[in-house]
Amino acid sequence: MAVVPVIASDQSLAFLAEGYAFGHRRFERLGTDAFRTRLMGRRVLMLRGHRAVRFFYEGDRFTRTGAVPRSVLHSLQDTDSVQTLTGAPHRRRKSLFVEALADGEALRAEFERAWDRAEREWIQAGRVAVLPAAGAVLTAAALAWAGIPVDRETGERRTAEFLAMIDGAGSFGWRNWRGRALRLRTERWATGVVRAAVDGEAPEGSPLQLVARHEDGLGSPMTEHARVVELLNLLRPVTAVARFIAFAALALHRQPAWIERVREDPADAARFAQEVRRTAPFFPAIGGRAVQALDLDGIAIEPDEWVVVDLFATNRHPAEWTRADRFDPDRFATTSPPEVVAQGGGDIATGHRCPGEPATVDLLVAASERLAALPSVLAPQSLRVALDRLPAQPGHEGVRLLVGATADAVA
């Protein structure tokens, strides 16, 4: 039986103070890939590494029910969502997302059209804040791809709401309350969209129509609330890619040698995007409760035990990544690099891994190519990445750039 180090005292305050770095520092200090402690008064087993990720996602060993803080659950997935289901019900509901996201080219095409429209405005203004601007582009693309016609005002409202939900999910207090309050407004809008789609007002074959027609099995339709929740779970994660795009903008300006490579070579753009996903602090961890007694390489896991796999630490594991502390997209030029687990691991179709991950990569590649082609320089600003802020972002506004003629004048 493996001996797992135990940090006896409750570490909640330390987690709030250290954020993403909490687990990584303790794994390194203890020289281990597993330790036990308490968070929010609950006993928890913390794990890192690709072996732990695979173990977590294989089969139906863990349930998300009761494993995610309510503040996060109600900001993002909400009750009745695919993430709260397990076993066959989870797989059936997840098939909706797998089918909706099967055509990644359609979403990318909408993104490119929305980006091109927005870029003309950025050049005219001479500046852009990448995080909110990319959020607006992604929201417009997601709505068009889903088959939801919107005017400019509606698009701006949904962008503000989606960004607030994402920004508040990892926090307590005002940011979380604001995100949850704006989610209620979004749900009222989405309820009208869903009702119209159920009545036949959705483009044929669109993701919106798939949501309206999906049945959870044995001829049982989803409830209206579940349809609303899952529609938002298709749209909002697209907007969330804006955080990766902001980190991509920062990486290009900190690694200027990659600007031409990303602009000129699609393979380099793909490697660059993967390294952004590896290094950007985004999803900090995945958690679940064991549904039965389990064993992981001699570590005994009790039924109902809370287990958290640290994704931030896994993507920086010194035994799994060469020079893990360096930004080096060329690490992905090898034939079999380690797998980035920015959004979890395992099989997309059968496990809990996010079915939107391929679309995320595709959108990030497209955005990186356009950022590399955009004539811009960094505006004066602090670009500190605060690891105690969940979710993290570069700087206060998410990377401000001077664009077009303004950038040429500064250069």
Image (cartoon, rainbow, N blue to C red):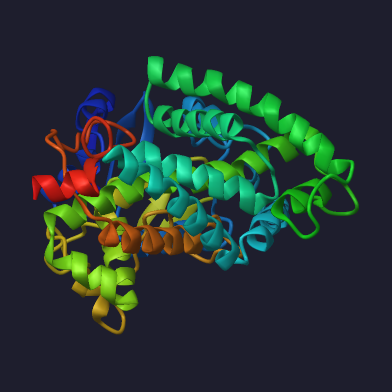
Furthest residue toward left: 411
In the displayed structure, 120 sits above or below 371; it is above
In the displayed structure, 64 sits above or below 78; it is below
In the displayed structure, 392 sits above or below 205; it is above
Name the side, left or right, on which 5 lies relative to 190.
left
Q: Residue at x 23, y 30 (%)?
A: 396
Q: Residue at x 47, y 17 (%)?
A: 177
Residue 363: % across, % down: 44, 59
Count of labels in the image = 0
Q: Taking the image as drawn, is residue 291 in sight? A: no
Nearest the eye: 193 or 320: 193
Nearest the eye: 316 or 296: 316
Residue 116: % across, % down: 44, 54
Q: Residue at x 25, y 28 (%)?
A: 11
Residue 55: % across, % down: 44, 61
Nearest the eye: 73 or 308: 73
Name the side, left or right, on which 124 lies relative to 191.
left
Furthest residue toward bottom: 335
Name the side, left or right, on which 360 lies relative to 235.
left
- Identify the image quadrant of the N terminus: bottom left
Q: Taking the image as drawn, is residue 37 in sight? A: yes
